[in-house]
């Protein structure tokens, strides 16, 4: 379990984490933990900031694009998912629209789920499984909950915070943990 907070993962034993998941362990990353699990993390497009909680952590521009904006290099994540994370500066209720894969993974949830969001990533899913997308706000349509595999392990990257007191959703947290553990949730549903 990689919780939210600052982008602390750069100082962790990344090889040990990758080895654990590759050998069949699960990875459940929320907010900063989701950033960590992505293949790459894009810097803020205007400022170059690479840590949503610390404005002084920035990368230098490598040039200027045709739109006149600076070009910043991507930062490496742990690479546990093919997803690419972009910073999404937004705090408060976000509506997350479940995909068909998300409805199967979280069977007790409505098609749209309100979850507290605190600057978690907006994700380009790439070859991963899109479980939910933001359905409102500046990053509408981008991945908010993404599932993937890494070696023999399962990975779930969760931008918002369903564990927060505000809009707390213990049911979806339980199913997210089951997803990371590689459990077939259909076996546990009672009719």
Image (tube, rainbow, N blue to C red):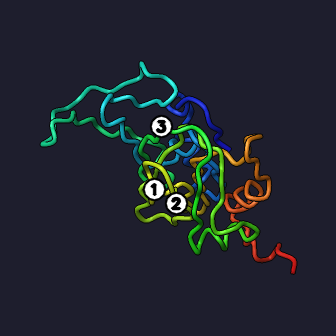
- Residue 173 vs 51, above or below: the answer is below
**Residue 12 numbered mark, or none:** none
- In this rendering, the label closer to the viewer, 1 or 2: 1
Q: Which mark is residue 133?
A: 2
Mark 2 closeness class: few <14, some 14–19, many ≥20 residues within 10 Å: many
Label 2 – label 3 distance at C-alpha: 16 Å
From the top left corner, tell me how far across and down residue 174 is, in percent. Answer: 77, 57
CA distance separating discs 3 and 1: 13 Å
Above or below: residue 18 compared with residue 57:
below
Provide the residue designation for mark 1. 140
User: Which callout, 2 or 3, points at the residue further toward the start of the chain?
Assistant: 3
Q: x, y percentage for residue 186?
A: 76, 76
Task: Pinpoint residue 15: horizontal percent, then vertical percent.
Answer: 53, 41
Reading the image, the residue beneath label 3 is: 89
User: Do residues under tags 2 and 3 come within 8 Å of each other at their CB atoms?
Assistant: no
Residue, x 42% and y 18% (percent of image)?
56
Q: Residue furthest left?
A: 66
Query: Is there CB contact under 8 Å for labels 1 and 2?
Result: yes
**Which quadrant: the N terminus?**
top right
Label 3 or label 1, whichever comes before in sequence order: 3
Q: Earlier in the sequence, mark 1 or mark 2?
A: 2
Q: Answer above or below: position of 15 versus 134.
A: above
Dot 2 lies on which element?
strand
Q: Residue furthest right?
A: 190
- Residue 17 percent across, percent down from the top left: 59, 44
How crowded is the residue under tag 3: few (<14 C-alpha within 10 Å), some, or many (20+)? some
Inter-mark Cα distance, 1 to 2: 7 Å
- Label 3: state its secondary structure: loop
Residue in the image at 60% along x and 31% along y: 5
């Amino acid at each position: 379990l990689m919780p939210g907070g600052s982008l602390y993962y750069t100082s962790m034993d990344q090889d040990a984490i990758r080895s654990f998941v590759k050998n069949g362990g699960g990875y459940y990353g929320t907010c900063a933990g989701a950033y960590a699990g992505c293949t790459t993390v894009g810097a803020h497009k205007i400022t170059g900031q690479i840590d949503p909680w610390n404005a002084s952590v920035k990368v230098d521009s490598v040039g200027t694009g045709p739109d006149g904006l600076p070009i910043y290099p991507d930062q490496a994540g742990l690479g546990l998912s093919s997803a690419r994370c972009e910073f999404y500066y937004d705090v408060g209720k976000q509506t997350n629209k479940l995909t068909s894969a998300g409805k199967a993974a979280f069977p007790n949830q409505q098609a749209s789920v309100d979850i507290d969001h605190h600057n978690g990533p907006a994700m380009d899913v790439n070859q991963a499984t899109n479980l939910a997308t933001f359905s409102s706000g500046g990053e509408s349509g981008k991945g908010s909950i993404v599932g993937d595999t890494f070696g023999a392990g399962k990975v779930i990257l969760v931008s918002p915070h369903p564990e927060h007191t505000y809009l707390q959703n213990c049911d979806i947290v339980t199913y997210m943990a089951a997803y990371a553990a590689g459990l077939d949730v259909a076996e546990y549903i009672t009719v």
